[in-house]
Image (tube, rainbow, N blue to C red):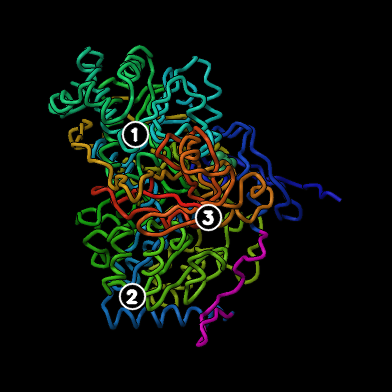
Amino acid sequence: ARLKPEATTNMVCGFCSTGCGLKIHLRAGEAIGLSPQTSYPVNLGMACPKGWEALTVLDAPDRATTPLLRNASGQLEPVSWETAMQQFVGRMKSIQKEHGPHSVAFLSTGQIPTEEMALLGSLAKFGMGMLHGDGNTRQCMATAAVAYKQSFGFDAPPYTYADFEESDALVFVGSNPCIAHPIMWERVMRNRRSPEIIVIDPRMTETAMYASQHLAIKPKSDQSLLYGVARILIENGWLDESFIAASTEGFEEFARYVAAFDLPRVVSDTGLKPEQIERFAETIHQRKRASFWWTMGVNQSYQGTRTAQAIINLALMTGNIGKPGTGANSITGQCNAMGSRLFSNTTGLLGGRDFTKPEHRQQIADVLEIDAARIPTENSWAYHEIMEGILKGKIKGLWVICTNTAHSWINQNLAREMLDRLDFLVVQDMYHTTETARLAHLVLPAAGWGEKEGTFINSERRFGVIKKVRKAPGQALADFHIFKLIAHYWGCGDMFSMWTSPAAVFEIIKECSRGMPCDFTGMQDYGWLDAQGGVQWPCPSELEAPAQERRLFEDGKFFRENGKAMFYFEEPRPLSEPTNDGYPFILLTGRGTASQWHTQTRTGKSAVLRKLYPEKPFVEINPADARTLGLVQNEWITIESQRGRMLAMALFTPAVQPGQLFIPMHYEGTNQLTDAVFDPYSKQPSYKACAVRVTRG
Ligand code: SF4
């Protein structure tokens, strides 16, 4: 018989960065079901399939329920937490003794609560003496973070979700919210202003199908297009000159630079028709409120930072920022990517500070009541530098928390070779079967979303609460408790005596934010956050009952020292791996469905979600190319790059242009093909386009 709930409680979803509010149905204090919250300001009663299935994936039979240690015959076997901790500490310390303190590193995640990230980053760097630690947010948001930091002076997405409904023209660049952020897309569908929807994407994505203008550019020509549109706006005087004068700098240099992006050049770079480019510019001018949204098509590029800034520049020059329905808006990926960006001690010091600034180190030392000398004075290596450090013999021990490097990292064969070379690989995860956990020397079983407490920060800077509504299976522990255990066994537990619970850490990180643009010292406790329906940063002390929807820069003041936003630009670079006779197709990768998440570590455990999406890999190919190759619909074909190969079923569709293929990132083989090139500023991998060939069978 169906169990009837006795009570409900609210919390936010733990998959994507939308941060939907879910109502958890409880019986005897345990979750037995869920439904979307109807009054939460983010999702207004909606949830996507992943959210509906969030509890199911906790029951998977391959949950890690006990620590596992690789034995002499190479098998992972169950051990006690005591043994696991002795092994962890003993082997990490002995590596540090032999090769130096920086020879061990960590790779973390945007999927655990902010409080856990802050504890991990502080334990690893201030307690264990590590210098190098990065997060999987390097794979999704590093570009946006760097672009904002340079242009605005702080990593600060300016928008609120109401902007989806209040815009007259929504420009999506390399973004497919229809499936990647389906609830945000529902907010677009609620827009009653008859907006123009402009999609810039080589592929006819689900979002592009709804667009009034789909600009199917050649892969990686977006930067050139955006500069060309800027030129048209300037030549026609379609500018907000008072905003440019009062709130920006560097416009004259930018205007001189983009004068070279005349129509013939942009047509040649992008493959678009002149009238498409002109209409795009006219639309931005004619529509009162234009908003610009970007996601991984921009971020995951060898020139992502400057492309993101080309978007930011359009918003700045037209004054489309700080007002309803506007903004240069990066949509985050993971549920707590924003927490990772600000409070994980990876790309920066706690609170969006800088490791290299003595005053910032002292501020954090004072809050944490530690010696400032314990805080590294230099930045960590980025993810790929840590991986390359393994090849160079500089990184010997690696601690991977809640991410699946062996599946998700670019150029997978090389990534696995790197992991294989480690003297000691520790994987801390909910599941012992991830591709990375299978390579580990030690697996630490972790509780998941719904089995622990804390806060996530969503794409629009909103703190939302997660709660413990289920017991973790077996001996699995909340990451928070694993970090505390490690601190104890490492011998630095005293340093974390104030860090008694996630709620206590919430107070600590509040203090870490004081005086920074992300100041949230005015927030009260988890119960207050819940009652408010989540709260966006900033929330300094004077804000007792903050409005539900707030955007940044309403006063035209930015976070750079002079209060002005800066125009950044640079010559676009050619495709990092163009086609040639041997590899005549460009492979595009991306999210394939609303029902799967990243490497399917969790969503692959739900029978419902698996039914909603092909379990066997498929590749989209244009029917004209399929005819030329003599392929049959649904036959297995081999896709091969210079780095690896994978089998996939051929799906004929005009969604991809001739000469292009598309494979979703959710399949294990996809990253056998991708090419390890990186943006020079954000060091984000360029997953989106590489050269491949197709053979039958
Ligand atoms: Fe969860 Fe994102 Fe789906 Fe909302 S849109 S239910 S946050 S996965």
The three-letter amino acid code for the residue at tag 2 is Lys
Dot 3 falls on a residue whose secondary structure is: loop
User: Is residue 118 in view from this perspective?
Assistant: yes
User: Is residue 335 in view from this perspective?
Assistant: no
Sequence-wise, the earlier of marks 1 and 3 is 1
The three-letter amino acid code for the residue at tag 3 is Gly
Indicate if the residue with disc 3 has its beta carbon within 8 Å of ligand 1: no
**Splitting the image into 4 quarters, where does residue 489 fall?**
bottom left
Q: Which residues are magenta?
A: 59-77
Q: Residue at x 63, y 66 (%)?
A: 62
| Secondary structure mainly formed by the magenta segment | loop
Residue 172 included in the magenta stretch of the image: no
Q: Position of residue 271 (x, y in %)?
A: 32, 28
Q: Residue at x 62, y 65 (%)?
A: 63
Viewed as shown, does residue 208 lie left or right of 239? Answer: right
Dot 1 falls on a residue whose secondary structure is: loop
> Which quarter is ligand 1 in?
top right
From this view, report whether residue 397 is shown above or below residue 117: below
Return the mark for residue 697.
3
From this view, report whether residue 437 is shown above or below residue 627: below
Indicate if the residue with disc 2 has its beta carbon within 8 Å of ligand 1: no
**Label 1: which residue?**
218
From this view, report whether residue 336 is shown above or below residue 282: below
The three-letter amino acid code for the residue at tag 1 is Lys
**Label 2: which residue?**
396
